[in-house]
Amino acid sequence: MARAPALAALSPDAQRVLEARFLLRDARGHVVETMDALFRRVAAAVAQAERPYRVRNGGSPAVDDWADRFYHALAGLRFLPSPPTLSYAGTSLNQLLPCFVLPMGDTIESIFDTLKQTAIVQESSGNPGVDFSRLRQRGSRVEGSGGEASGSVSFMEVYSTASEVIHQGNRRAGVVQGILRIDHPDVRELASAAGDSHRLTHLRVAVGLTNHFIRAIERDDDFALLDPRTRETVDLWPARDLWEMVLRAIRDHGTPRLFFLDRINAANPTPQLGPLEALSPDLAMSLLPFEGGSLGCLNLASFVRRTNGVATIEHAALREHVRLAIRFLDDVFDVTSYALPEIEQMCRGNRKLGLGVMGFADLLVELGMPYDSDAALRTGEEVMRLIRDEARAASAELARERGPFPNFRGSSLDRAGGEPVRNATLTAIAAMDALALIAGCSPGIEPLTPLGDDALATPMAELAGVPLADPVPPAVRRTAASCGFAADELLEEIAARGSVQGVGEMPDDVRRLLVTAQDVAPAWHVRAQATFQRYCDNGVAKIIRLPRTATGRDVDAVVHLAYALGCNGAVIYRSRRG
């Protein structure tokens, strides 16, 4: 395959992130690994999965050859796997998967068994999603004791407290995605709890919306809240009133996140194993109980070629790296250590991948396309369709070499009559901001975003206090320098404003090109998310940004647009900037 430069240069901030999160340390906490050694360690460890297949298939390349190919993709910062893979491949911890879903039943034993499993997963560097929707509602009768149930939100608080004290590999606090269905009676309490900074501080909260609820809003009907055990109606509320409670919480606090339950289940590749009820903490992966996903990102900004001053996408190189990334991410399932035997069984049974992208905004700047333009959407569609098609071809090739995923028979993919594939899912766009910082590009498919932006789940928060010196997006800094206005004062003003609009003396075409997340209208955020969703087996982690003046009606319009355009969900933040 085409080789990238042996080792890409890092910015000072990228080096800080690398040292804080990924480089190995000795017993005294001193860094004892270089970036080059990190990438060689990861490449060599993951390539060990090739050994048994080489023996079985005879003529496949040697393990060392695959390690070399993996190394060049990593070192060139063209493909990076999830943070646990970078941190722990080839180490004693060796738990390489970033996200999981854990089941919970409506008994004290099940609730605290799942809490124990959550702690084990978090301690081993994973982030679980947990569905609390089976827990009986607050105030319902507890058989035997005659007492009243404290409700699902009270147990969310327990999980939040536990997450606060668990640190993943001694590097950062754990994360849990707490899920509640919209028809659970406790959803009203959950909406109220969103504004309480002391209740669910270390728990991300998402509400699963059903098609029935959305129709009830549109018709202004009453909506039934259901006993989670019997599915009988315990209360009727005007759907619009319930929705207004959720909208106020989102407008004021940026939570809960929303996802469309029926939509993700319509795309469930293994319905014979049960429904999808919960998602990973970034909402990118829809997973079954005890299931985990292997995730990674292609750096789109690294696949741009300039010929006589004209920028184009290197399609051939992108195709090669998609195929290599699919092989790498599939290999991860064979070399990782599993925190629980149930997780190993589900992961090996379905082998779900989530290959995504980062650097989309940087790619657009290189191509001279504003983020909020039809040309940008066409480019996003072209790129993601290519990634999906090549990923499918690569997974089919792996299935011919190694066999399809064990649960393929009876799956929707099997019933569709298509060629067997190695992986139940292939594509997802996860929010892995730390990887984007290392690669020197914009995260995921987000617009250009200053690192101090208050409306985003910024790398600052994810990196648990790592001090970052340069808040200006790399694409803005590069373009400013090429246009001759890279004065420090100008860049500081861009960072302070979160926008290039109204900043200094700047040509209109450059100002139009360098639109930031703050400048992009909400509908364009949604359209970008929907464009990539069309070619993703899983979800798209994308923040839909609203201005500070946004109302509940604005939030409502965004959610309905996301639903209408086929998105899997919506994560909405209202800016605090003036």
Image: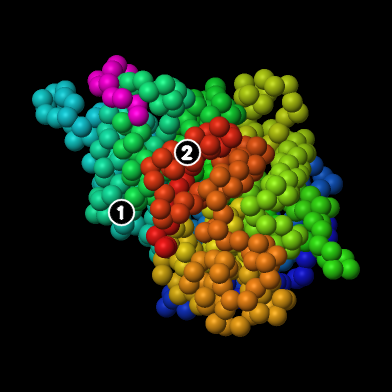
Q: Earlier in the sequence, mark 2 or mark 1?
A: 1
Q: Which residue is mark 1?
A: 201
- Residue 14 belongs to the span the image colors magenta: no
Pointer 2 and pointer 1: residues touching (CB < 8 Å)? no
Return the residue found at the far left.
Answer: 146
Name the spot of residue 447 as percent of width and height, x first. Answer: 59, 57
Question: In terms of depth relative to the viewer, which is nearer, 355 or 55?
Answer: 355
Whether residue 255 can be seen here = no
Q: Amino acid at mark 2?
A: Ala
Q: Which residues are magenta?
A: 227-240
- Residue visible at 23% across and 34% down? 151
Q: Amino acid at mark 1?
A: Thr
Q: Quadrant of the N terminus?
A: bottom right
Question: In terms of depth relative to the viewer, which is nearer, 193 or 105?
Answer: 193
Residue 326's mark?
A: none
Name the spot of residue 434 as percent of width and height, x first. Answer: 54, 63
Question: Quick check: 558 above or below 509?
Answer: above
- Residue 229 belongs to the span the image colors magenta: yes
Name the spot of residue 259 as percent of width and height, x first. Answer: 47, 37
Q: Nearer the viewer, mark 2 or mark 1?
A: 2
Question: In terms of depth relative to the viewer, which is nearer, 124 or 179?
Answer: 179
Color style of the picture? rainbow
- Residue visible at 24% across and 54% down? 198
Q: Residues within 10 Å of mark 1 (few under 14, many from 20)?
A: some
- Residue visible at 61% across and 53% down? 445
Q: Which residue is mark 2?
A: 557
Question: In terms of depth relative to the viewer, which is nearer, 459 or 481?
Answer: 481
Whether residue 276 can be seen here = yes
